Each structure stands twice: as structure tokens, then as C-alpha cells.
Amino acid sequence: MGAALPQERPVTPGAMSRARARADPEVFRDLHREILAQAPGRPLRKGRRIFGVDGAKVNLPRPLVKAGCATPNDGAHYPQGLAGCLYELEPRLPFDFALHADTNERTAAARHLETLSAGDVVACDRGCLSYEMLLAHVVRGQDAVFRLKRNANAETVAFLAGPLDDRTVEVRPDRDALARLKARHPGAAFGPLRLRLVRYAAGGTVFALGTTLTEDDGFTVGDLAAICRSRWRLEEHCKTAKWFMALESFRAESERGVLQELHASFVMVTATRLTANGIDAEINDSPDNDGSPDNDGPPKRVNFKHAAATRGCRGSRGASGRERGRPPPAEPQFPPENRTSGAGRSTPSLSQQHRILK
């Protein structure tokens, strides 16, 4: 590949294995931040960054039970965790990611909000709306857009039964939520929060949204509908990351090794997406291309799964290559972890500090 090594002799697989056993998984998160810093200017909507948050449950190696990951039921052998991702919707880039021992998506989403700034907008899926989740956005100066279930709360039920398509209501904590909040913040008061409810129809389906964004912020019902549509990209990303990138096919059996593989996969997804975005811009800006500004058709986009396979992402199955009679792309090999233990071990004992978010 033309990369200079700090020594004349190449690194042996055994040396890589021993080094991996000592490597901090956070190095991949640092690499991810460096890659994002090199990304070109990312588009905004109404001057705001738009994010989506979601998670996918993944089966983990059995030893991670000791790291606090529980099995989904008494008869299950493998524990589960939640691979959570905060996704920047306009450039379609993973912004933050983590493996959560708690598979509750609301809890995981609240943790990801800590990486955002005031003024950012987060699109959340159905089931995320609650007083606690709404409060988590408000106290940070962030805004949220929630897809609503018909029975999300009493205010939603009354709104959908009424004639108005855009109104503002007040949301108060129920008894259980108030007890949890007072236990975490003794002496604090938790008053009503304002939530804008909107309703619109698209493709013969009626959608209901709840948001902290107001018309004074410059967001019309059409803008909110566009944000809701763009969130489907996150759904596709989660499916790609979990199945095509084979996030559940962990080679490691320790917490440290699993996090290395998970973080490395998200780094590869980010690098591949940036490459695909650059190619998209080139082919659509070219005057000799059907996707030029003179064409009224939709812009052309690179198939992300094919781009990931070309890059040789971990877990890439190369099915399309087999179908066309071509050999599948080479799959990068992670060296096995050094599991030598007891007297005479070749590596020092590692810290048992848990790094999976509790």
C-alpha cells in the first residue's frame, strides 16, 4: 500500500495479536473524530445540524455477561447489547456510536445527546417520546422531532381526534417519571414542557409528529416532514451495519476485543460514506453526465453496499460479486486475541474496567 513502517522488518501476526490485547478501543473513536474533521463542509437545514439516533440489538460473545450484558431471556445462551448510533442525516455520516449494556433505546439515545451542541436537531423514532427524553433535549438547548404513536400520550390522542393539524400542547411527567427524576435530582422542580404537534398526509398515510421546533424557528410542517423522511437513511444504515457489515460476527471474546471490532466497523462505514459522498458530488456536477444540473431527474448516488464491498469492509460477504462470476472481495483478518493466562503468560494482566456503557 506504500505506507512506510517504523522498522525494516514487517510486523508478525503474533506481535499484532499481543499489541491488540493491549490496544485501547478508544483509539478508533479518536480516529473517527479525525476522519470527520477532514470531511468537507456538511450541509445544514435552516442553519441547523440534523441528526437521527437509533440502535440495533446485537448478540455478543458469552463472556460479556461479566461486563453487565444480560441475556434476553433465561433460555438464551448469548447476551445482548445495543449498538447505538447518532447519525448526521444530511451528509449521511455516523457521528457518534457506542455499545450499551442497557438495551433500552431511550437510555442509549440520551447518552448520545451528550456529544451534541446547543441548537442541534435530533430526529427520533416512534416510542422515544417521553417527558424525560423531552427534558433531556430542552436542558441542553437542543431540539427534537418525534414520530408519534397514536396512543403516545393523552395529548396525542386528543390531537389526532381533533380537527387541527398544527397545535402546541403542554406535556407533564407521569407519576413514575416524576419519581425517577426526583430520585436523580433531589429538590429540583419539573414543570410542564411545550410540545408542538403536527399532522400531515403523504402517500395516502397520515403521519403525526411532535417537536420542540416552532414556526418562529423557521420550520414549517413541510420542513418537519422532510426531516422525518431523511431519518429513513438511518434505518438503512442500521440494517447495513448490522447485517451487511456482520456486526454480530465478533472474532473476539473479551469486552476490549468486541469494542475494537465494533468501533473499527463504524470507522470503516464513515470512511466509505465520505468516499461515496465525494463520488456522488463528482458524477452529479459533471456537465457530461445524466445527473448534471440540466437534468430534471433525481441525482445519481453510489450504491453504498457495493462501495463497502470494494473497500473490503469487515464482514463483507461479496454476494454481488459471486452473482457476476467474480471472486468476492478479500475480507480483512483481525488477529486473534492473546488469551494466554496464568503463570508464564506473555502479556501483562489487563485492567478489568468495563468500557461498555451501563
Image: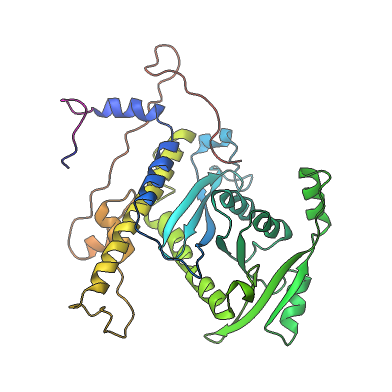
202 relative to 330 in the view: left or right: right
Question: Which residue is located at x 51 percent, y 70 percent?
Answer: 46
Q: Quadrant of residue 309?
A: bottom left
Examine the rendered structure and indicate whether residue 210 appears above or below residue 16: below
Looking at the image, which is closer to me, 135 or 228? 135
Question: Which residue is located at x 51 percent, y 75 percent?
Answer: 226
Looking at the image, which is closer to me, 215 or 329? 215
Rendered-image quadrant of the C terminus: top right
Question: Which residue is located at x 25 percent, y 73 percent?
Answer: 285
Rendered-image quadrant of the N terminus: top left
Q: Quadrant of residue 176?
A: bottom right
Question: Which residue is located at x 54 percent, y 39 percent?
Answer: 356
| Residue 2 pos. (x, y %) | 15, 40
222 relative to 314 in the view: left or right: right
- Of helix, strand and loop, which mostly describes the magenta segment? loop
Answer whether residue 202 is magenta in the image. Answer: no
| Residue 332 pos. (x, y %) | 28, 44
The magenta-colored residue range is 4-11
| Residue 38 pos. (x, y %) | 34, 51
Examine the rendered structure and indicate whether residue 210 appears above or below residue 42: below
| Residue 122 pos. (x, y %) | 56, 62
Looking at the image, which is closer to me, 282 or 329? 282
132 relative to 175 in the view: left or right: left
Q: Is residue 86 visible?
A: yes
